Amino acid sequence: MAYEFRLPDLGEGLTEGEVARWLVQEGQEIAEDDPLVEIQTDKTTVEIPSPAAGTITRILVGEGDVVPVGTVLVVIGGDRATAESDMSGGQSQCQSPGPVSSGRVRATPLVRKIAQELGVDLERVDASGSEGRVTEEDVRRAAASGGEPPGPVQEGRREKLRGVRRLIAEHMTRAHREVPPVTWVEECDFERVDLDALVATVLKATALALREYPELNARLEGDEIVYLDRYDLGVAVQTEQGLVVPVVRGCADRPLAELAEDLGRLAESARAGTLQPEELRGSTFTVTSAGKLGGLFSTPIVNHPEVVILSIGRIAPRAVVRDGEVAVRRAGTIAVTFDHRVVDGARAAEFGLAVIRRLEEPDEL
């Protein structure tokens, strides 16, 4: 008997997921609980085991495709011809009239539904997806050209936006669309900061300053500002897969050495791709630093639904004036980008100066 495995509800209010990588192939025999597929959500990548034993009869969703919860991803067991017939029949019921594919075309049920709604014959569509699969973009392109195959291929190498990069694009687009950002920048003397523990020191200084300026440790939900009484700070970490933001908990109350140890562990896990979902959730504020690549300063995008992000500019020896004389000091910049709907400019500046004051007197941390 065939088993249709559907994309499960992965919690956190998620309604869709991306097939990041298939761990099986058609015709393969698998046992129950064998690794089946990796699903990418807007939080993390989850490996899902097979709920049944049998032969992988048909894989219905290609790698890189984003589908809603409940979509049939794969058929396990049964006969391939029967599976194709059942899937084709199941999708054709209760749909508006339109061209019907023979079933030989590789496309997800969602893409088949869109094709029928737009009156596109899938057999006449040039497929651009993995393993010759027809994508939603292929169908919509064909619909725009009157159902005919598209014209000459546009120049340049094309790569589908997928995985972490797709999630970053969606997240940043939403933040840029919804948040009116303003950036405040000031110089900071890092002469007394141990650069080996730079980010951990900034986390501690930031969390202590947030206690004085609670509107920066907040979220905007509808017409309400939610003031948070925990100081769980996200740290942007660059990985081969893209930017991820693990969360360091309790930054205001824990010793600096403990924060540095926790931060190192999280950064290592981020680069190895082994972060747990709970290690990416619930940040109240974000800190980012690009190290030597940071430039003089940057204007990062606020990590929605937070209302502020702090960035550290490049730290280097610079000529500064101290007590009326020019001196060489290890200096850099602190930039605070904030959501002007929630935070006023004066308060953001006062907060930034409070962070800098602590960094210039790190013995007090």
Image (cartoon, grey):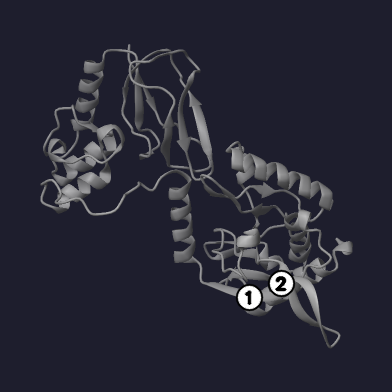
* Residue at x-position 77% and y-position 54%: 196
Figure label count: 2
Gap between marks 1 and 2 measured at Cα: 8 Å
Residue 299 percent coordinates (x, y): 57, 69
| Residue 245 in the image: above or below residue 121 | below
Residue 193 percent coordinates (x, y): 81, 62
Closer to us: 175 or 360: 360
Closer to us: 45 or 253: 45
* Residue at x-position 31% and y-position 35%: 130
* Residue at x-position 69% and y-position 76%: 186
In-image side of 255 versus 200 (left or right): right
SS class, disc 2: helix
| Residue 58 in the image: above or below residue 288 | above
Location of mark 1 (residue) = 184
Disc 1 packing (10 Å; few <14; some 14–19; many ≥20) = some
| Residue 352 in the image: above or below residue 255 | below
Instruction: Return the disc, 1 or 2, that comes first in the chain's sequence.
Output: 1
In-image side of 63 versus 196 (left or right): left
Instruction: Name the kind of residue labelled 1 in the image.
Output: Trp
SS class, disc 1: strand
Image quadrant in which the C terminus is located: bottom right
Residue 87 percent coordinates (x, y): 24, 25
**Do we see residue 244 in this rendering?**
yes
Disc 1 + disc 2, Cβ < 8 Å: yes
**Do we see residue 254 in this rendering?**
no
* Residue at x-position 48% and y-position 55%: 171
In-image side of 228 versus 179 (left or right): right
Instruction: Name the kind of residue labelled 2 in the image.
Output: Gly
Disc 2 packing (10 Å; few <14; some 14–19; many ≥20) = many
Quadrant position of residue 60: top left
Location of mark 2 (residue) = 352
Q: Residue furthest right?
A: 363
